[in-house]
Amino acid sequence: MIVFIIRRSFQSIVVLLVMSLLVFVGVYAIGNPVDILISPEATPQEYEDAVKALGLDKPMWEQYWIFLSNALRGNLGNSFVFNEPALKLILQRMPATLELACGALLMAIVLGIPLGMVAGIKSESWIGRSIMSGSILGFSLPTFWVGLMLIMIFAVMLGWLPASGRGQTVDLFGVPVSFLTPDGLAHILLPAFNLGLFKLSLTIRLTRAGTRENLQLDYVKFARAKGLSNARVIGVHVLKNILIPVVTVLGLELGNVIAFAVVTETIFAWPGMGKLIIDSIGVLDRPIIVAYLLITVTMFIVINFVVDILYSVLDPRVRLGDLKA
């Protein structure tokens, strides 16, 4: 366990260093943010003063060194637009994104596992085929189109749910959350379903494949020969075994949900990190862009680590010392 943690920590540091360099170089090559931020009527002297004030008059390698030195102290720079620490701005938006991502993944798990098991048990029936047809649609339909259709049907035509915003929030341990209020729940339903539709389809297919495979194994036949009910065989023994690949994949997909919530947050005006990064890209706010990507990479690393731990808990045959990052 200790060896695994040390090895993973060292690898994580290397990944973050390489990623920070790639991101910094990529953002540096996009263009000069002063051209967007300063007024076109500004004098050359005002332009030069703005460049110096933002620290953009130095060569790229020196800018990166300053950024890296500050990052080691927890300072990822100040936003060019808001003139506030980039880390602070992202952390203020992070609860909304995490709430949306967890809601999307929860929908995928709560709906996907039962539907996938039904599709696996009754694979040749019309129910099983209907579920699989629905999962194919979930894979195929683009997220932005589904989001617009959800707004048009449930918000505009039927008027059942709100089309945008986060709704009323309450503080939970000092963090604002919306799922504890009726208004907040109404606001999160559409964006969470839109964000989790692909993961729902993925969960259905993984669960169906695992169910069909496990039903043919000897331990299921032995359990039935002992007189165990079909509900216990499927609900306990089969379910426990199919959870191993499902947890592994969905754990990694949580990082994707957080990172790629940009489209959903933009469509539904959800005040999360995704909308912040889109607005920052439009004005080339470098500190926000770099900080967002580094935080996202850190989330992926942490989620990977947690998934490895859960994998070893679900399957005693797996030992952390044998896992390879």
Image (cartoon, rainbow, N blue to C red):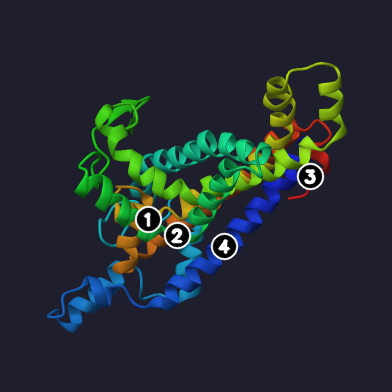
Label 1–label 2 contact, CB within 8 A: yes
Q: Which residue is mark 4?
A: 19
Q: Which residue is mark 1?
A: 146
**At 87% from the left edge and 32% from the top edge, which residue is drawn?**
218
Q: Which residue is mark 2?
A: 141
Above or below residue 89? Residue 39 is: below
Q: Which residue is mark 3?
A: 323
Give the CA distance from mark 1 to mark 2.
7 Å
Q: Report the disc number at residue 50.
A: none
Using the rendered view, name the quadrant where residue 45 is placed. bottom left
Give the CA distance from mark 1 to mark 3.
38 Å
Q: Amino acid at mark 3?
A: Leu
**At 28% from the left edge and 67% from the top edge, which residue is drawn?**
53
Q: Which callout, 1 or 3, points to the residue nearer the camera?
A: 1
Give the mark nearest the N terminus, 1 or 4.
Answer: 4
Q: Which callout, 3 or 2, points to the residue nearer the camera?
A: 2
Q: Amino acid at mark 1?
A: Val
Q: Amino acid at mark 4?
A: Met
Quadrant of the drawing holding the N terminus? top right
- Counting from the top left corner in percent of width and height, residue 320 is at 78, 38
Q: Which callout, 4 or 2, points to the residue nearer the camera?
A: 2
Left-right relation of 43 to 91: left
Q: In front: 319, or 17? A: 319
Label 1–label 4 contact, CB within 8 A: no
Give the CA distance from mark 4 to mark 2.
31 Å
**At 68% from the left edge and 46% from the top edge, which residue is drawn?**
9
Give the CA distance from mark 4 to mark 3.
23 Å
